[in-house]
Image: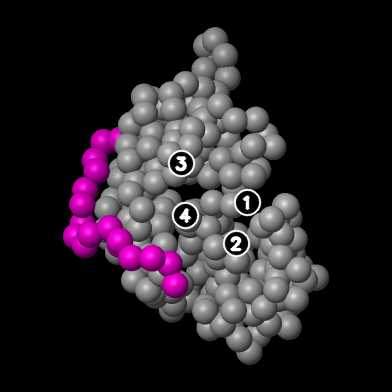
């Protein structure tokens, strides 16, 4: 699924050079649930941007589903993101004047060629994903008409709409109260158990990290701990 070898990322030049990642090597198997944690500035967000094909490493290799993406151009990276990766952000990143249904349909509109669905199928897919996260009765609500937890569930539905092979979540409970955060984590548990989706979650919250099968801890751009927390990678097919 994910294979990273001797990966480094450096920002700036000369005396101002900052090595955000320093010769990192790791693998994430299909169906694993992995939490990436560490203090601010440890490199975990930089790694997530590279895994998500939003940035390229300075050196080293990144393979996704047996394809090396670490030297792709912008168009090639965009194609990989569109086909393989679903993103969930701490701040939800919803459009203020778009109903929940339109939010989830949005990434489907950017699909190309054989992957592009007719409008009716995009709507059906979006309705299905909103139902999956418990928002079947909120499809025509604007973000301002939804709670924080409901907005994050819309964001999860949007990330799932393209049926990605990997789901990346950056502090997905960071802006939520305890009850809403627990509801979001329950959705992750259900997705992992029932659909076997590969989850990579960046978090500062040890309670969130502890729910993953595996916790990788970063410090100063390096992996300082890689712990198996129980469970085994899911081996079934997607529903």
- Reading the image, the residue beneath label 1 is 82
Q: Which residue in the structure is indicated by mark 2?
A: 162
Snapshot quadrant of residue 125: bottom right
Asked if the residue at tag 2 contacts the one at tag 1, i.e. Cβ–Cβ closer than 8 Å, the answer is yes
10 Å crowding of disc 4: few (<14), some (14-19), many (20+): many
**Marks 3 and 4 in Cβ contact (< 8 Å):** yes
Q: Quick check: marks 4 and 1 in contact, CB under 8 Å?
A: no
Secondary element type, mark 3: strand
Magenta residues, start to end: 221-239
Left or right: 53, with 233 as reference point: right
Q: Main secondary structure of the magenta part?
A: loop
Secondary structure of residue under mark 2? loop
Where residue 64 is drawn, which disc sits there?
3
Q: Earlier in the sequence, mark 3 or mark 1?
A: 3
Q: Residue at x 33, y 65 (%)?
A: 236
- Nearer the N terminus, badge 2 or badge 3? 3
**Separation of disc 3 and disc 1 at Cα?**
13 Å
């Amino acid at each position: 699924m994910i294979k990273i070898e001797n990966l480094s990322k450096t920002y700036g030049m000369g005396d101002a050079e900052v090595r955000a990642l320093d010769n990192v090597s790791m693998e994430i198997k299909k169906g694993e649930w992995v939490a990436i944690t560490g203090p601010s500035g440890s490199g975990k967000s930089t790694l997530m941007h590279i895994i998500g094909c939003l940035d390229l490493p300075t050196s080293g290799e990144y393979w996704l589903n047996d394809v090396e993406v670490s030297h792709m151009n912008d168009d090639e990276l965009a194609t990989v993101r569109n086909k393989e990766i679903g993103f969930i952000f701490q701040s939800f990143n919803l459009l203020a004047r778009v109903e929940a249904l339109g939010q989830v349909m949005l990434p489907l509109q950017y699909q190309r060629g054989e992957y592009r669905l007719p409008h009716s199928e995009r709507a059906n897919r979006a309705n299905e994903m909103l139902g999956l996260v418990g928002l079947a009765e909120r499809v025509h609500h604007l973000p301002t008409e939804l709670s924080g937890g409901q907005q994050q569930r819309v964001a999860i539905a949007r990330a799932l709409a393209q049926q990605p092979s990997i789901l990346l979540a950056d502090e997905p409970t960071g802006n939520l109260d305890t009850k809403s955060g627990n509801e979001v984590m329950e959705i992750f548990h259900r997705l992992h158990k029932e659909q076997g989706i590969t989850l990579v979650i960046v978090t500062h919250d040890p309670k969130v990290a502890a729910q993953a099968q595996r916790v990788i801890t970063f410090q100063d751009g390096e992996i300082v701990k890689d712990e198996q927390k129980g469970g085994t990678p899911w081996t079934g097919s997607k529903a």
